[in-house]
Image: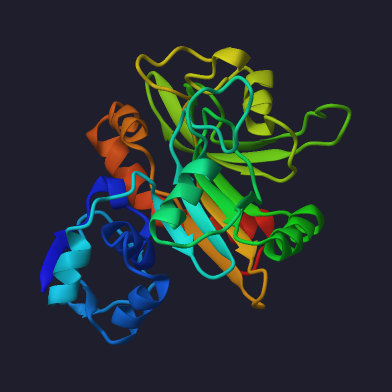
Amino acid sequence: MITYRITLQDHCRSTESFLLNMLPKASIGYIHKIIKNNHVKLNNKAATGENLLCYGDEIAIKESGKMSSLLSAEKTGLDLLFEDDFIVVINKKPGIPVHKTAEDKGKDLVTMTEEYFRNKEITCKLRPVNRIDKGTSGAVILAKSATSAGILGRFVKEEGLGKVYIAAVQSGISQSGEINIPLDGKESLTRYNCLIQGNKFSILAIYPLSGRMHQIRRHLSGVGYPIIGDLRYGGAKIKDYPGHALHAFITSLKHPEQEKIITIHAPMPDYFISLLQKTGKENFAAFINSLPLLRRSLVKEDGLSL
């Protein structure tokens, strides 16, 4: 068996996501096969694709000639969270736009993901189901067909996505609360819980219950606690960081073909982890331990059946 120790960069990643990134040339069918045949172990027990990996866990993959070849393949640069015949979900890095815009000279997430599939000799035109700001990191859902995009688009419009964000704001915000400030003439509601109250900044779990443009950023700025790095809405500058300290950590959606809710976790980017470590060893350890529990809070705040 080839064994790996789960790092902070993979904390709260599913087993399937871990394999998608370790084996970028493998088909999703192959990944499902090795899991089904018990060729993947988590802490010495048979793993499932939905297992949530935690910092310090040990994952082991059965050795074979094909596995060695797949493991040696060049990694894609994308962080794959979920894939099936209908959708692919990417953990977007900060500073990358979801789709091409006139002002952006570099690559966008849609183009990068389509290139990934072309390299696997798969042609598909991807359509974003949700969009997060260029400076925000986290889960972005891309539909593989117009049909899937239409089904998910209607679901998002009628039911919305279940969402939990993590944000760093200046210290002093209350332990929990809600922000009910209309945006663009429409009712807008954001709830939050403070996970860490640090000396210089606080870490929040945020639940946007409506979907206005820049809602979280505008709401937190509106109550005097802008997100760190969000220069547009009054946040302090973060040196050498291409975005702001806001991360789409959990996203829940109804599958476009199957009658079930899919819940996807997106591990935090390296710089965000470094920023959080500045809250102190004990605070950071408590925060890391709290992350797997936030899935339960999504039921409470959003009412989705997970």
- The location of residue 232, given as percent across then percent down, is 60, 14
Q: Is residue 286 above or below residue 197?
A: below
Q: Is residue 226 visible?
A: yes
> Which of 179 and 262 lies nearest the eye of the viewer?
262
State the image quarter where residue 43 is shown: bottom left
197 displayed left or right of 47: right
| Residue furthest right as drawn | 185
Could you tell me residue 126's position as x and y percent? Answer: 60, 53
**Scheme of image coloration:** rainbow
In percent of width and height, residue 22 lies at 26, 59
Q: Is residue 61 visible?
A: no
Question: Does 163 appear above or below 211?
Answer: below
Location of the N terminus by quadrant is bottom left
Name the residue at 27% across, 50% down. 75
Placement of the C terminus among the 4 image quadrants? bottom right
The spot of residue 213 in percent (x, y) is: 72, 32
Does residue 72 appear to the left or right of 96 in the view shown?
left
Residue toward you, 120 or 44: 120
Q: Is residue 298 left or right of residue 83?
A: right
Q: Quadrant of residue 54?
A: bottom left
- Residue under the image location 59 percent in, 59 percent down: 252
Between residues 67 and 250, which one lies in front from this camera angle?
67
What is the tally of numbered marks visible in this picture? 0
What residue do we see at 68% from left, 27% from top?
219
